[in-house]
Image (tube, rainbow, N blue to C red):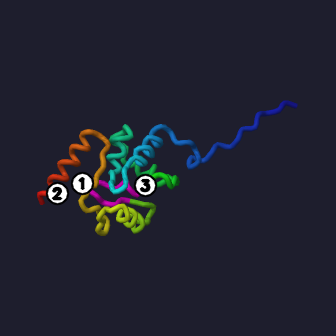
């Protein structure tokens, strides 16, 4: 009688080690400073896949790591986007960091928006100057 090798069952996707792109996304999100926000598209660009904003949303939705400030990632135009169905919690976390959030939108989004690139920094400075004039 011959013995057969016993294979361990495959691990569910939720417990699998992150691939390169999700790891880059989580790294980018960890680097967003308190009091600043980035859009799903901004995070996708900084992680190296500019058109993968929906993938970023899925990664944020399934992220269970409390060390990742997922509440700092918002939808385009300053809208809050999703937060596991608890937009009230996302709103309060952003307010606790000093952002002004009215209903479902970050006020002063152009100034609060964080982009970790030289072009992004220049755009943020221009937005701050424009908002001071208004």
In the picture, the disc for residue 48 is none
Q: Bounds of the magenta span?
A: 70-81
Earlier-in-chain disc, 3 versus 2: 3
Q: Residue furthest left?
A: 133
Question: Residue at position x 38%, y 40% from top?
Answer: 47
Disc number placed over residue 70 in the picture, else none: 3
Residue 9, percent across and down? 68, 43
Q: Is 70 on the left or on the right of 8, as rendered? A: left
Marks 1 and 2, how far apart at CA: 8 Å
> Looking at the image, is mark 1 or mark 3 nearer the viewer?
1
Residue 53 image point, x, y percent:
36, 47
Which element is circle 3 on? helix
**Mark 1 to mark 3: distance in Å?**
19 Å
**Image quadrant where residue 101 sits:** bottom left
Foreground pick, 97 / 127: 97
* Rendering coords of residue 120 (x, y %): 26, 43
Please tell me whether residue 78 belongs to the stretch shown in magenta: yes
Q: Which comes before the other along the chain, label 1 or label 2? A: 1
Q: Which mark is residue 131?
A: 2
> Is label 3 or label 2 in front?
2
Q: Bin the neighbour count of mark 3 within 10 Å (Cα to Cα): few under 14, some 14-19, many 20 and up.
A: many
Q: Between marks 3 and 2, how big is the CA–CA gap?
A: 27 Å
| Element marked by disc 2 | helix
Lateral position of residue 57 relative to residue 42, left or right? right
The residue drawn where x is 19% and y is 51% is: 127
Q: Nearer the viewer, residue 5 or 110?
A: 110
In the displayed structure, would residue 31 be above or below residue 94? above
Mark 1 or 3 closer to N-term? 3
Q: Which residue is under mark 1?
A: 111
């Amino acid at each position: 009688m011959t013995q057969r090798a016993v294979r361990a069952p495959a691990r569910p996707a939720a417990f699998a080690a992150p691939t390169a792109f999700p790891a880059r996304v989580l790294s980018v999100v960890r680097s967003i400073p308190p009091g600043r926000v980035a859009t799903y598209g901004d995070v996708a660009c900084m992680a190296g896949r500019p058109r993968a904003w929906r993938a970023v949303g899925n990664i944020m939705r399934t992220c269970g790591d409390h060390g990742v400030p997922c509440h700092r990632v918002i939808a385009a135009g300053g809208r809050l986007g999703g937060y596991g169905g608890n937009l009230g919690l996302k709103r309060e976390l952003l307010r606790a960091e000093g952002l002004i959030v009215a209903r479902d939108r970050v006020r002063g989004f152009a100034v609060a928006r964080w982009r970790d690139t030289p072009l992004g920094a220049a755009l943020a400075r221009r937005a701050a100057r424009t908002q001071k004039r208004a």
